[in-house]
Image (cartoon, grey):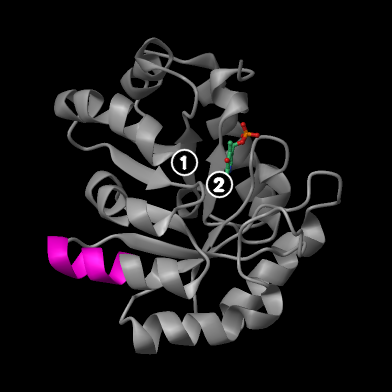
Amino acid sequence: MMHDGLKKVLMGIGEAARKAGRNPEDVTLIAVSKTFDAPEVVPVIEAGQRIFGENRVQEAKGKWPALRAMWPDIELHLIGPLQSNKAAEAVTLFDAIHTIDRPKIAEAIAREVQKQGKTLKLFVQVNTGREPQKAGIDPDEADAFLTTCRETHGLTIEGLMCIPPAEEDPTPHFTLLTQIATRNGLKALSMGMSGDYASAIACGATHVRVGSAIFGVRG
Ligand SMILES: *Cc1c(COP(=O)(O)O)cnc(C)c1O
């Protein structure tokens, strides 16, 4: 079965990767299904997509267990802010968390990962635009925080995530994230959304988080 939005985004990813001299298979599409329910999500699953992103633990908990019972190979990524009192539920529900941004969260996740005996892909979110209202560790504190994650909490961090300021050229932010990842020996870069995933891929994104370009405008 075909899905127009999904098809368009997969073609866009392929084109951006080839233009950057990269293999399209090195870019993972996370289909961001927040606010959309099963009737909108199922056609995208049926078209072959298996990796989805949600920004709220509560919403994911209501939506995904039933869908995963039908498609057990689905992989679910948490891309929204996490409170430490939701860490247990988040570790149970998700296969990846993109939003580790402070010691309290790192500690809570480490505790749950150990307790539940589960391996998750973990990303540290960096506030590349230093926006006060936005989550993420300050770029100047990222190196030290990554060391804390590793040495104090025993977490294996796969990569970094950022959400550039809405009104700015995203490229300098993607570049900054890439630099922090490189000097810390991290390979995964979660960056790029519907409006800027092509630039993110040009800058080295390994994971793009695309919602509205697949599902349509959120209500
Ligand atoms: C909603 C969301 C996206 C997807 O945004 P679109 O513009 O709809 O592609 C990506 N990342 C995060 C963190 C989000 O909350």
Query: In the rendered view of the protein, which quadrant contains the C terminus?
Result: top right
Q: Residue at x 65, y 70 (%)?
A: 178
Left or right of 96 on screen, residue 136: right
Q: Residue 57, image x and y in percent?
A: 38, 40
Q: Is residue 117 visible?
A: no
Q: Is residue 151 visible?
A: yes
Q: Which residues are magenta?
A: 109-117
Q: Residue at x 50, y 23 (%)?
A: 35
Instruction: State if disc 2 and disc 1 touch (CB < 8 Å).
Output: yes
Prevailing secondary structure class for the magenta stretch in the rendered image: helix
Q: For residue 184, what is the image quadrant?
A: bottom right
Q: Which of these two is toward me, 175 or 104?
A: 104
Amino acid identity at mark 1? Ile
Q: Residue at x 17, y 34 (%)?
A: 72
Amino acid identity at mark 2? Val
Extreme residue toward the right, this view: 168
Task: Identify the residue under disc 2.
Answer: 208
Q: Residue at x 47, y 87 (%)?
A: 147
Q: Which of these two is toward me, 202 or 42?
A: 42
Residue 96's place in the image compared with 197, above or below, is: below
Q: Residue 82, image x and y in percent?
A: 45, 53
Residue 153's place in the image compared with 131, above or below, is: below
Q: Residue 64, image x and y in percent?
A: 28, 29
Question: Which SS class for mark 2?
Answer: strand
* Category of crowding for the residue at label 2, using alpha-carbon neighbours closer than 10 angstroms: few (below 14), some (14–19), many (at least 20): many
Left or right of 62 on screen, residue 101: right
Task: Identify the residue under disc 1.
Answer: 30
Question: Which SS class for mark 1?
Answer: strand
Q: Which of these two is toward me, 49 or 67?
A: 67
Q: Residue 11, image x and y in percent?
A: 58, 32
Query: What whole-number distance in Å separates the C-alpha atoms at marks 1 and 2?
Result: 6 Å
Q: Is residue 114 magenta?
A: yes
